[in-house]
Amino acid sequence: MRVLVAMSGGVDSSVAAALLIDQGHEVVGATMKLWGGVSDSGCCSVADVADARRVADRLGIDHHTFDFTEYFEAAVVDPYVSAHAEGRTPNPCAECNRHLKFRRFLDRARRLGFDAIATGHHAKVVRDAAGVPHLARGQDRKKDQSYVLAMLGAEQLERTLLPVGDYDKSEIRAIAQRLLLPTAAKADSQEVCFIARHGSAAGRQRFLEQRIALHPGRVLDQRSGEHLGDVAAVELVTIGQRRGLGLRGGLAGEDGAARRYALGVDVATRTVVVGEEAELATRFWPLSQWTSLDGSLPLGAVIEAQASAHGRPRRGVLEAGGVRLEEPARRVAPGQLVACYVGDEVVASGVVTAVPAGPRADA
Amino acid sequence: MTESTAPTAYLDHAATTPLCPEALEAMLPYLTEQYANPSGVYASARRARRAVDDAREQLASVLGCQPGEIVFTASGSEADNLAVQGVAPAGRAVASAVEHKAVLAPIGALGGVLAPVLADGRVDLERLGELLDSSVRLVSVMAVNSEVGVIQPVREVVDLVRTHAPGALVHCDAVQAVPWLDLTECLAGCDLLSVSAHKFGGPKGVGALVVRARARGLRPLMLGGGQERGRRPGTENVAGIVGAAVAAQITAAERTETVARVGALRDHLVDSLTAAWPGLAESVPRPLRVAGNAHLQLPDGVDGEELLWLCDERGVCGSVGSACASGAREPSHVLLAMGWTKAKARQAVRFSLGASTTAAEIDHAIEVVSSALARLAPGAA
């Protein structure tokens, strides 16, 4: 097959290209420049493009760079910003996969005469008896990335190769070392590539305050309604968050007070409702914007639902409005992706919808 | 199919041109036996010095200036930077919005202002005039735009500057002009003018800045030895300078014939494609452009980068957008300045012909571009 490999400049996509060459495919590499802004890390820095190009040179394949910055801004960054403005917690990596890697990149590859695209994700495309492709967890459970690909449809999976998913990460690094790839020892990439220091609230705040107005918010106790403290930006608070709520008890509970967690965020009234951890528990994850291989949902199926990239899967039953959980689990912030698995295979995905912060609908 | 026998078409002469054989031949001795440093005190050094002096005279006669007014640099970008940074700190700087980044970046760093252009890419003289007053020290307007090939009204710019900002110097980036225009006319009113050898059959790594009498206060970018009258320290690139002068002489001698021949080839390329493809159009009216430029607006939905990928697979070289640091192609700042949207700017390509372009190359390009369009145009089978 003629395969266009999305090479980020990291070790996984480098080895993906090497594995495909080894399997006898005609391989060309391409790096997507996605973000023109300033970022410490990510898939779009000049150094990463240079790394991808040198890997391609080492492998003896052609390498191209695609400037998708306008599409990335429109499909990933703008929705990320407006989701925060509405108090939701978006998953930009999933949106990037949905709109950029497995849409625009795939479309371009098709027009340029490629049979398939490939990426360095740790996940597998497996085929059922009828030959229909399904997305499944990667060999290395600790590195499994099927969650961020869970929204892909059959038409996309049909033309996608994920060669890295058959290996453990240690094997991937070993292959890279054996082939003397310049990226063999490179650190794993960060989650949100377009924000420098995304892991820190300060990094997110700096990014968002240049784009939307951030508002201070009052932190209220769920039971008493008591005004417990204040946050600098209500738009940055995520359900389940404990730190950074301006509460003494939030840190370690040294003074004997119970730790308090954000139970609800209301941007309109600029309030954050907090309570004890037990009050975060729910037996229902409300979901919408469903995706599945063929568009239909296996309603009533017993599935395992996963609410973050490496979160613990929770058993439950898939319903039209969400997942009914067997055991109570923490509430998930609106805007987050939930991937539903049967065994190792993804059967559906949905996006968490907002529920009122007051009396719990599932109580 | 092997690369040596498959037909190709190099249509990116605005990016660089092949080294002409005469230039290579003239350069070879200075890359081999004649390696002496022109600053030496022995016979071989004096020969190298004479070669550089001869080359300086040859280039001066092509450009219509005095030999002593030529400062050899390592690139057109360096010549542009030397012009802008060498005089502009003494006052305000003004440039057209479609200048090369080697002009725009130093102008921007010095806090200069940009004059808008008309939809056809020519500098808006009225708006430029409004920006001029006695505080302006430098006005920089290119002779020919690198992207769309538009010939700028440099003479009118000079007149405006002399009227509204008599103390200001005029810099003309003529890097794209040498193959197509008689620069003696262009230089008649300018105080500073940049050229680059590899755009007209010379080697890469050689540029020149003409510094006329009014600009003689120009300050060097680098400090060091006294080469180039103290304006550009560093041992002279003897072979490169010799090659540049030979290429300039040949280009000037053949210019009239080249413009006529290449213009006809360009017309054939553009007319064939626009006749066959509704929605394909010239970005700027032809009479405004130099003979080698074919800048095309593609049918709606066809991405320039994808078209060039398919062209590249069959040996046809063209250009799209401008290269960013990562090597990705960004929407051209020239097209954006002309009022194009980013989306429209991505649906455009530039083919640029040169003195070495042949009819066979153009025929091959027409066939390859047509079949690429057949694949990429929405609704095409």
Image (cartoon, grey):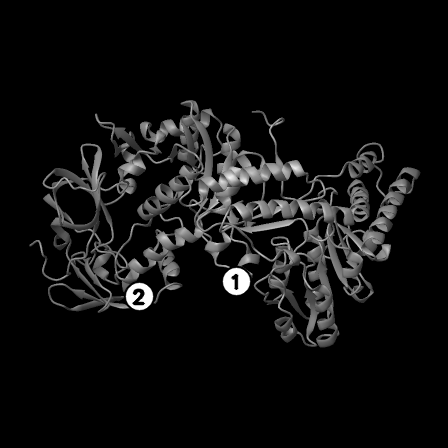
Kindly identify which chain the residue marked by label 1 belongs to: B
Circle on res. A117: none
Q: Is residue B321 above or below residue B215?
A: above
Q: Is residue A75 above or below residue B380?
A: below
Residue B235 is situated, as x and y percent measured from the top left of the image, at 79, 45
Measure how far apart labels 2 and 1 are at the Cα level: 41 Å
Q: For mark 2, does the 10 Å Cα neighbourhood hold few (<14), some (14 to 19), or many (20 or more) residues?
A: some
Circle on res. A232: 2
The residue depicted at 81 percent of the width and 32 percent of the height is B32
Q: Could you tell me which quadrant the N terminus of chain B lies in?
A: top right
Using residue A194 as the reference point, say whether residue B128 is left or right of it.
right
Q: Nearer the viewer, mark 2 or mark 1?
A: 1
Element under label 1?
Answer: loop
Using residue B66 as the reference point, say whether residue B299 is left or right of it.
left
Residue A196 seen in render:
no
> Amino acid under label 1?
Gly
Q: For mark 1, does the 10 Å Cα neighbourhood hold few (<14), some (14 to 19), or many (20 or more) residues?
A: some
Residue A27 is situated, as x and y percent measured from the top left of the image, at 45, 30
Residue position marked by numbered label 1 in the rendering: B339
Residue B180 seen in render:
yes
The residue depicted at 85 percent of the width and 53 percent of the height is B61
Kindly identify which chain the residue marked by label 2 belongs to: A
The residue depicted at 55 percent of the width and 48 percent of the height is B274
Q: Could you tell me which quadrant the C terminus of chain B lies in?
A: top left
Residue A129 is situated, as x and y percent measured from the top left of the image, at 21, 25
